[in-house]
Amino acid sequence: MNASIIDASAIEELQEAIRTRTCIQPYGAGSKTALAVADGQCTRISAAGLSGVVEYVPSEYTFTALAGTPAAEIERMLIENRQYLPFDPPLAREGATLGGTVAAGLNGPGRYRYGGLRDSLLGVQFIDGRGSLVRSGSRVVKNAAGFDLPKFMVGSLGGYGFLVELTFKVMPMPAAYTTLRARYPDIETGHAALVRLTRQPFEIYALELSVQEGLVELLVRLGGATGTLAARKERVGAVLGGARPEVLAGEQESALWADLRDFHWLPVGHNLVKIPLTPKRVLPLEAELAAINAPRVYSAGANLAWVALPGEIDGSDAIAAILVKLGLGGLVVLGEAGKRRIGARNGETFAQRVKQALDPDGKFVEF
Amino acid sequence: MDYAAFQSELHRIYPPDRLLTKDAQLAPYESDALTSFRSRPKAVVIAADQQDVIETVRLCHRSGVPFVARGSGTSLSGGSLPVESGIVVAMNRLNHILLIDPDERIAAVEAGTVNLDISRAAAPYGLYYAPDPSSQPVCTIGGNLAFNAGGAHCLKYGMTSNHVLGIKAVLPDGEVVQLGGDSLEAVGPDLVGLFVGSEGLFGIALEVTVRLLPKPEAFKTVLAAYHSLEHAGQTVAEIVGGGLLPGAIEIMDNLAIQAAEAAVAAGYPQDAEALLIVEMDGEAATVEADFERVMAIIQASQAYQVRTARDDADRMLIWKGRKSAFSAVGRLSPDYIVQDGVVPRGRLAEALAEIQQLGEEYDTRVANVFHAGDGNLHPLILFDGRQEGALERAEQLAGRILEMCVRFGGSITGEHGIGVEKRKYLPLMYGEADLDVMQAIHTQIDLQGISNRGKMFPGS
């Protein structure tokens, strides 16, 4: 069968498509370009037709929406009630859908404050490999009934089912933000400042360490009641060390974070790789990357590295060897990459058992 | 392999003092904190290290003998209820804290480690482990993980699953797997997320890596007394609706207040129909500003008495009353069942009124203690097990409450898990296809169904 795209808008239609095809690749808006590359043999099924809010009760701080709903649309809805998606969905301005964000398992800088997708996703409805429509989780903020398939679906890359509907909890948006930008002569001092900061009881909304063209910058975003920000900023500044940090506020501040979230720093022709890590793995990774001109941002208090690889280096191969050496895994998110999941993995046999249960005929393409 | 052969194999792994088979030795393991269910296992083995657990699971797998892992036996849903034809694996000696890394803000501990011991070990670094079930001075992290334990502070900080980063576990067929790692981020399906809360059906966790948080630098705690539950509930709605995110919001009703007061003399006003506890925590400046807003809401509410914790000792006293409420209710009644349903926060008052009505209908006293901030109810249904039909009546009432929670769009359990207690109610929440998928996953991971048999699924 040739590759084709089905744009289903009715659930029964989707179930039927899944039952009758042998190879399926769920597809959202294609904003994660590397993940959206078609597998030639497969039927791509688009979730674009499954769009819209099913339920939103602002006072409950939860909403339910169809998986193909653009994240930006949800953000516009929430802001009316001064609420927001705490996982800060990346590429929202590029059309990222809720389902695609969950499947790719991608969080933006804001995840530092209240956690990522896994901490916000309360319920899912999906179609499994046999075409069954399955619900898991709930619509309330607290639930311990049954296996937690909503969490399992975060990062599942469309390999276990077709997401139909998602329920999230949301957070109150702080009255105001302010950001400190501190420059460091080298990565070691910048990294040390980051670690010092994470040990403090400061309520930081985002904490990113950017390494680009020899420039090392730490970005610290604070949020809260307007009256508290001045004093809190001073305290954070005192921990940052080095030269007095630059203070950003207003539109300039929000634009900075919006651009970071959508990877506007990514140079043209580069692939983008997501690498989960921890603060102590930053310097070893830096040593390995020294030979490659790869702009990078350590996100979420250095729990994650976004690395831009020049297109002429085969993204997957060059970095995969480094990752294996350091015991790290990675995901090529943007670019024309071949391999998408690279580097070290664990729990594969466990994941395979779940695959057998959800998709016994192996219809959903796995990366 | 017959049981005799199995037992002689057990003797190869365990010395006599760690292999309990006599009735008097087994009796303490017959039930957990859900005391109305009892079941005597064939043996209890006291594992000394991870290898003991792995070998035991492999032996059980070869022999088809069911096993139940048990930490401190504090489950309120019968999560560690033994199986008569099987054994109990006591995990308490696997209590080594393997790593506290303050720069990474993680701890790696063995599964039998007591919850509060993690925070104690992290305290010198200004860090702590956030999930705080009421049983935290005794409950183990392995049990917390299996049942995704919550606590008073999960409104702001989340449940156990929001704090577990990595798990080393032995699956029911003896395979040892490492899931997750030590980062907050991951690539690939969230296997840790699936394992947490699987109620022991996926095997036994051996080692757990958890995240640590910097201790909040400031706390502000207020106690407000109301003449009606409804007014307390309205105040909660206003606080949450106002965009405030307290560390905890708790409500206790009159029966619970009296019990707690008799037990620990926390200074609660005993004539109150409802007591609201609100705690703000975090960075000093933020707590200060947000607490002012909370106080403004409370002062404008129907509260007839308001008490702010003077100092840390006073704050601990307020919490002592709340955290001892379950055991204190034992003073009011020889037996009780704790329910754990969740309703949307906006329907709290409605839910409480219905619970009261149901209590009258069944001529049964119900005390209420609940995590109001996240709509997690804890009705304590009081009964005297010596009276004929009392337990059955209490269980019927409990079932009606769970039905109500689902009808309101909530859940039958917020943090205690299904266990044995709520098995028959799982189909209230999930349809056939939903349950089929869960069963299919269970079968793939434990074909023989030997790991914590009889939990979660109806008729299991």
Image (cartoon, coloured by chain):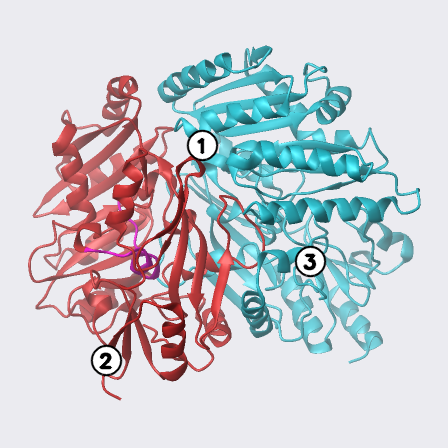
Chain colours: A red, B cyan
Apparent side of residue B295 relative to residue B277 in the rendered image (left or right): left
**Disc 1 secondary structure class:** helix
Q: Residue at x 70, y 29 (%)?
A: B324
Report the mark closest to the observer, 1 or 3. Answer: 3
Mark 2, chain letter? A
State the image coordinates of residue A214 (x, y, percent, origin top left): 9, 46
Q: Residue at x 58, y 28 (%)?
A: B250
Apparent side of residue B345 relative to residue B266 in the rendered image (left or right): left
- Tag 1 residue: B125
Give the mark count. 3
Find out whether the residues at labels 1 and 2 contact each other: C-beta distance under 8 Å.
Answer: no
Point out which mark residue A4 bears. 2
State the image coordinates of residue B359 (x, y, percent, origin top left): 76, 36
Image quadrant holding the C terminus of chain B, namely: bottom right
Earlier-in-chain disc, 1 versus 3: 1
State the image coordinates of residue A357 (x, y, percent, origin top left): 51, 74
Mark 1, chain letter? B
Task: State the residue in front, B54 or B307.
Answer: B307
> Mark 2 is on which residue type?
Ser
Query: Is B192 placed above or below A208 here?
Result: below
Which quadrant holds residue B103? top left
Report the mark closest to the observer, 1 or 2. Answer: 2
Residue A340 shows up from this direction: yes
- Tag 3 residue: B423
Find out whether the residues at labels 1 and 3 contact each other: C-beta distance under 8 Å.
Answer: no
